[in-house]
Amino acid sequence: MARALPKCKICKEEINKNDVSSFIKKSSGYFHVDCESEKGDKEKKTCSFCNGEFESEKDIVKRGSLTVHQSCLEQYHQSSEKVEVKVRVRTCPKCKEKVNPLDVDALDTDTATYHKACYKSIQRQKKNREELLDYIALKYNVEFPTGFMLKQITDYHNKRGYSYKAMLVTLKYMFDVEKVPTKEGVGLGLIPFYFEKAKSYHQKLRKAGNSANNVTINNKTVKIKAVAPVKANRVSRYDLSSM
């Protein structure tokens, strides 16, 4: 069995022992060179680009192992000739692809470096899950979904590929369109049964909406804008296959 690679004492990521210039071995353990550099930057409070001092905490921007002025980072992004700055490429926790902390589409958090799109996707999923849990609590008249319900949600999400948004839309279809009554102890077992029905229902709504916005004049289809009437308890049109 291959031995596990040592990890940096600062960032906790693996040390590439084949690249001897990228790490330092001390009595206390292994350290990445740029992690040690970051530690030094914190102590001396200078920009990794211009070596200038920071006038306030608001002007400090963290990018991976670097600490820089906001203005210096903006100039770096706008310049066609990039200043050579040594920074360790990270792995985005969402997509598992490499991400350079200095790239304009990179986003640094306290725990990791993400692609901005990946981070937005994570936040969107988190928001959708919270909305789903709030709706379940409201409809089932509970303070918070039960452990059994949470397990069902996790199974539907991981095993069936249902998004949190799609599950919410399915539940709204069940209760607002089909008028399914809530039953104690049943949990969310009806979601798979109504999922395709909800999907078909919203597809028909979208198709009807698109047809209403197109008028044929002299054998040519013309798109028009129409203001839909406001109705009580109106169900929005969703595409569950894209959620």
Image (cartoon, rainbow, N blue to C red):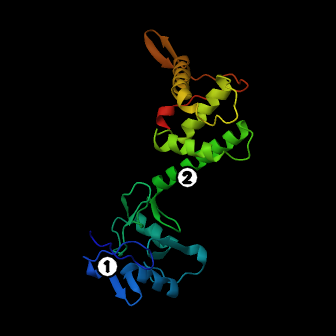
229 above or below 141?
above
Pick out the residue farthest to the left: 18
Q: Can residue 180 be seen in this view?
A: yes
Dot 2 falls on a residue whose secondary structure is helix
Q: Where is residue 72 in the image (x, y as percent from the top left)?
A: 46, 73
Please tell me which residue is depicted at 61% across the width and 22% down the height of the picture: 226
Left or right of 144? Residue 157 is: left
Q: Position of residue 6 (x, y in %)?
A: 35, 77
Q: Where is residue 204 in the image (x, y as percent from the top left)?
A: 53, 20
Q: Which amino acid does label 2 sit on?
A: Gln
Q: How far apart are marks 1 and 2 (CA)?
A: 33 Å
Left or right of 98? Residue 165 is: right
39 above or below 188?
below
Q: Position of residue 78 (x, y in %)?
A: 42, 64
Near mark 2 (Cα within 10 A), the count class, few <14, some 14-19 or many ≥20, is few
Near mark 1 (Cα within 10 A), the count class, few <14, some 14-19 or many ≥20, is some
Q: Mark 1 points at which residue?
A: 22
Whichever of labels 1 and 2 marks the residue nearer the N terminus, that label is 1
Q: Can residue 52 be seen in this view?
A: no
Q: What residue type is labelled 1?
A: Ser
Q: Mark 2 points at which residue?
A: 123
| Nearer to the camera, 10 or 161 | 161
Please tell me which residue is depicted at 45% across the width and 78% down the height of the picture: 10
Left or right of 171? Residue 111 is: left
